[in-house]
Amino acid sequence: MKITKQATDDAILRELGERFARIRLEHNLTQAELAEQAGISKRTLERLESGSVAAHLSALIRVCRALDMLDRFDMIVAEPPPSPIAQLKLRGRTRMRASAKKPSGPSAGKWSWGDNK
């Protein structure tokens, strides 16, 4: 089944679970072996593969790591490139810290010549 916008959440969870089960079998692993490699309980893996209950995201990441599939997350959520304006401001450097918040009210503390009485 192809995952589309029209598919229900339950249908997507079932399809993902079936895909994980097929990949696990391609790796010739039992549920117990994969669960141990992933550091999760066998019951959590059973739930993930059945699609009956959404597993924790960390369990999904652990299973993907054990099946050597973590690189596929990059296809789902790609790292956004910096905007052209940000690239010009940074001039090839990597941003190291966040900017300070600017005061929003009138700046009563401005100094000018002749104010030091």
Image: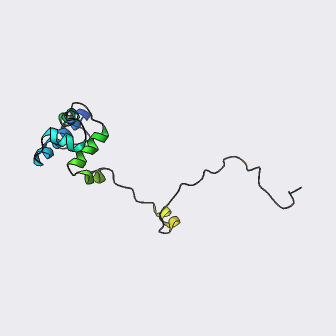
Would you place residue 14 above or below residue 75 in this image?
above
Residue at figure coordinates x 87%, y 60% from the top left: 114
The answer to whether any part of residue 1 appears in the image is: no
Would you place residue 51 above or below residue 26 in this image?
above
Q: Nearer the viewer, residue 76 or 2?
A: 76
Q: Which of 29 and 24 is in front in this view?
A: 29
x, y (%) of residue 51?
Answer: 21, 34
Quarter of the N terminus within the rendering: top left
Quarter of the C terminus within the rendering: bottom right
> In the drawing, does residue 114 fall left or right of residue 30?
right
> In the drawing, does residue 78 fall left or right of residue 45?
right
x, y (%) of residue 71?
Answer: 26, 54
x, y (%) of residue 69?
Answer: 23, 51
Would you place residue 99 above or below residue 13 in this image?
below
Residue at figure coordinates x 25%, y 38% from the top left: 40
x, y (%) of residue 108?
Answer: 77, 49
The answer to whether any part of residue 41 appears in the image is: yes
Q: Which colour scheme is used?
A: rainbow
> In the drawing, does residue 98 fall left or right of residue 19?
right
Q: Residue furthest right?
A: 117
